[in-house]
Amino acid sequence: MEDKKIKQSISSNKSKASLPDIPDMFLIDDLGKRQEFRDSISSDPVLEFDKVYFQTHNTFFNDMNLDQLFKKYLKIEELENPNNHSIQDLFFFLPKRTDIVKFRQDILSDFIQKQDLSYIIEDAINTLNKDLSMVSFSASKKGLLLPYSRLLKNYEDILTGLIKTLNSAKSEGLLQISGFLKQMKDHSYMEIWKEYDRRIEDEVPFFLSLTRRYDFTPISFSIFGFEKESAELSEKLKQNTDRFGKISSNDIKGSRLETFELALSSRNHHIRIPLVDAIVQIMMQVFGNPFQGLEDHVRYTIAALNQLNYYRNAAALYFRLTSRGITCVFPKIQDMDYRQMKAIEVNNFLIEVEPGKELVSNDVECNDKKRINIITGSNYGGKSWYMKTIGLVQLMGQVGLFVPAKEAVISLVDHIYTHFPEKEGAGDIESRYSWELERAKRIFTYATPYSLVLFDEPCSGTAYKEGLLQTVTFIKVSSQISMTTFFTTHMHEIAEDIENNKDIYTDCENLFVETEVTDQGPRYTYNVKQGRAIYSNAEKLAEAKGCDEIALKKLLEGRVLTNSLPQIEKKMC
């Protein structure tokens, strides 16, 4: 609720004070198109928009393990940008223009090349938030002017420092932020607040003498030090002090207001302290709050700086990966028409590896002549993770991030569609195969020649022969749409058919995950090579796991010998 109030306050203050627009550091230009798309789909009751579209959205994030990327590596769940986009919007509604990708790349490059920039931004935000916390917003404390004065001075110093720092940036985005901060510093309200601060400091020096009992119960207090306008102030103070106690002396002479005393008790214990709640209320009624609106002004600036948290965290991820020996580069970005992806020695850092082991890098390449890629190989050989690596390279590159590779070139795509096995539960209404077909139909309904589609073992939820025929159908339809598609499968007949009929499958390419057969079972290299796998090593894997026929027979014999296999007693009827 508090965040909502702050956003409303910022919006209200912007309208009243004519504050400049906060520059958008993401340029997610598809939000309008998304609404248009929503409207067009929702108007068709047959397509059931919410089910069709948002399930595609949700399954995509699950398939690509993006929640792990956001929370564990980028450590951010919200973009905190003025247009209220989420990080899911950033990764789902991909930019279709190379200049938007370059705009984001350049901002991140500034944070990577100038490492202290992250600390400067973080320190500025933390300092302003701390100063804001010192300003109490309760009615009784609103007149404490010292926290406002401190906030104003620190705010101006921070604006000055950030403007100077960001002016040396190379990216258009950070230069826009610098220009915004200069507008905030030069805003007409800033001069009003600074003038009030000077007047209060120069014209109203005062302190309070408070008398308390031994148990610190207030007994009486006195005000000293008003140098100017004493007659008017004296009258206001007298009028507004009645609710706190009776004034012992109304005889005020000369141009100096020397003493006001409120007698609350005859027993006393004398101490001197700064302003207390009661006198603050009096001062607020005399002066009002000269810093009205300063808090919202500062929050508005913090809202602009908070956008940079995404880039700060992305830069931190860059240094985290490179410290692990994972090379990261900004890919060369091409228009959609090129329909190309090439990445050398890619590492998928989302893979959890055992201690002491290193990630295995692979190359990724597809182009207009080999748009359909069939990947075969052993179980646990790494086919699915290779698919996720392809999607990760495209995603990270297209949203403006670096990619974990030695070099990379990617063409923009209009969308990435995924079709990974659904986790089947006991309460599923529809069968696994039915769900697979529904997802596939959704993909073929919306995909274009500029889409990237990842099928992970499609049609495995039905009989082998039927699944084989249906997968071939998917391949043919993908070729007809002319979209870039990757399939993983255990149906080696498909890869063999492609290899033997190049004249038919002109845009298809066979890939396989290499697995070495040893006496101890299969040894997975996780290397992806051109060609096709001959078998899936299922038998060798069963032997290695002690689940082949011979091993299971020995297991049962052992259970019989150790009486760990209960016997059913036959009863006579």
Image: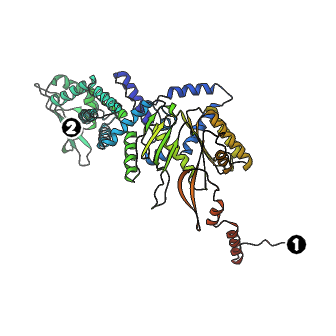
Q: Which colouring convention does the figure follow?
A: rainbow
Q: Is 305 placed above or below 254 here? A: below
Say if residue 227 shows up in the picture: yes
Q: Residue 573: name its quadrant.
A: bottom right
Q: Are marks 1 and 2 in contact (CB under 8 Å)?
A: no
Query: Residue at 46% of width from left, 50% of height from top?
Result: 349
Q: Is 87 placed above or below 382 here? A: above
**Residue type (three-letter) at the residue carrying disc 1:** Met
Element at label 1: loop
Element at label 2: strand
Residue 341 x/y as whole percent: 50, 40
* Numbered circle sitting on residue 94: none
Say if residue 306 shows up in the picture: no
**Residue type (three-letter) at the residue carrying disc 2:** Phe
Residue 448 x/y as whole percent: 59, 32
Query: Residue at 17% of width from left, 33% of height from top?
Result: 206
Residue 506 x/y as whole percent: 62, 39
Q: Is 318 placed above or below 299 here? A: below
Residue 3 lies left or right of residue 366; in this view the side is: left
Q: Which residue is mark 1?
A: 572
Residue 203 lies left or right of residue 6; in this view the side is: left
Q: Which residue is mark 2?
A: 221
Residue 273 x/y as whole percent: 20, 42
| Closest to the observer, 186 or 65 | 65
Give the Cα distance between marks 1 and 2. Answer: 103 Å
Q: Residues within 10 Å of mark 1 (few under 14, many from 20)?
A: few
Return the disc, 1 or 2, that comes first in the chain's sequence: 2
Q: Residue 258: name its quadrant.
A: top left
Query: Residue at 46% of width from left, 31% of height from top?
Result: 28
